[in-house]
Amino acid sequence: MTDTLEPPARYGSSVPEPPPRPTATDSKIPALDRLKSWAFNKPCPRRGVAHATAMTAEQNRIGHVRPAMEFSAVERTLRNGMEADVNRQIVEDTKTELEPTVATVRAKLQEHNTLVRDVERLAGEPIIGPHGETLDTTTAQQRHDDLDISITAASEAGNTKNRRISPAQRKFVERLVWLDFPLFVYFMSSCLNVSVISFYQSVGGVIRMIFAALFGLFATIAIARGLKFLGSSHRAYKDDDGQWAGPPQMRGERLLVFVILAGVAALMGFRIGSDVLESGMGIALAVVVAVVLATASALLNWVVYAAEYKDGSADTERLDAYAAGLERVTRSQQALRALIVILDEEIAKLILQGFRIAGLIRTRNISAANDSWQDAATRYARSVHQGTGHTGDLPAHQLDWSPLDTALSHLNTLEAQFLADQAQLSRHDEEGVL
């Protein structure tokens, strides 16, 4: 008997694969496992006992070992159902948790852009100058800075014409003005022949005292406002030392100031002196009292005039006019910038919250797929029939992340826009544009 030698396979020819290894065809789920699964939900999930039975029977029909990464028909049907449930949950989670956050970020970013445009608009808002001219913010700021430098240089050189009166002193003078009111009422009561002590005893006395108070109020306001107006007008004609340097045409107004002061002093002195004489105190005392009170009244009204006259100069008036317009714009811009800062913090937190929510959605649904009763039933059935080997490996899940990825793409776009706006604002702040 001779041995028959098969010729060697030629290069490139196919080598037949060995036949698959057969498996037992009588595998079944133990009755005790069924009982424990129904009672305790393990080793097989209660909902998957019937499916595990079907998968075991299917493997008995297959009859040979198959790759662990290959699903049978029943296994594939069970996996498809589980993946469909998880995909629906991904859509629901994205719609209810992530998309509202993305929409809020989009709305906040639009509000942020609106505020930035408002700041830019304020930068170009016209400002009314000291002579009624219309200026843009840049020109007004330049003129303000030039005047500020000029006034500072003059003050450092020893000039005093630009010296200001403090706000506290101005408030004190404004309150001091009302000391004239009782003096004028006292004078008018004499003119209307009504006693300040017993005027309430008759209707005529009350009426005359009311008129005396009205005339006193009118005189107080008129003289105070007149002196303030003259003082503010005359301060434009000061020399570098703060002294009067007005033209000859202004002498009449300058003289008017002294006439007003002398008139008020004479009225007060005459009224007080007359009362002293009527009380029998003697002429000498009446003259002394009249002179003292007349001087005090004149000094009081001189302070009203001097407070306006010495409060700066024409240059400081122009500086104040520019500063008032610039302050209005600056305050509005600062308020808007404060809102932008608060809004930016909210946007940054919302963006981080959106990414955190996306991560939680992804982790939660991956865990739901890994821990699903469908996969647990498949692993248990495979452990029974051993048709895919002794490991519990299953094919990777094929989940649809497109809804989550789309929402994340929108969030990434909004984040990129937000960061670009932040960088642009930083450059503008460095350049002093906004």
Image: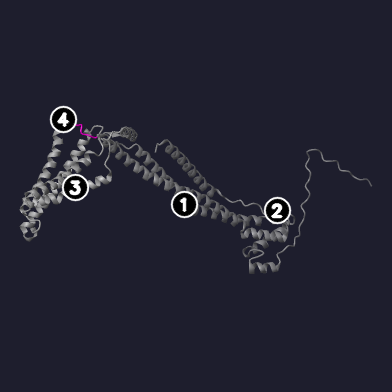
Name the residue beneath numbered marker 2. 68
Left or right, 285 with respect to 62, comes to left
Which sits earlier in the primary sequence, circle 1 or circle 3? 1
Left or right, 139 with respect to 62, comes to left
The answer to whether residue 356 shows anywhere in this view is yes
Residue 340 pos. (x, y %) = 41, 45
As rendered, which of 365 and 86 lies closer to the eye?
Answer: 365
When the figure is inspected, residue 141 is found, relative to residue 373, above or below; the finding is above
Name the residue beneath numbered marker 4. 248
Which sits earlier in the primary sequence, circle 4 or circle 3? 3
Name the residue beneath numbered marker 3. 177
Name the residue beneath numbered marker 1. 100
Magenta region: 242-249
Disc 1 versus disc 3: distance between alpha carbons? Answer: 64 Å
Left or right, 145 with respect to 33, comes to left
Disc 4 versus disc 2: distance between alpha carbons? Answer: 114 Å
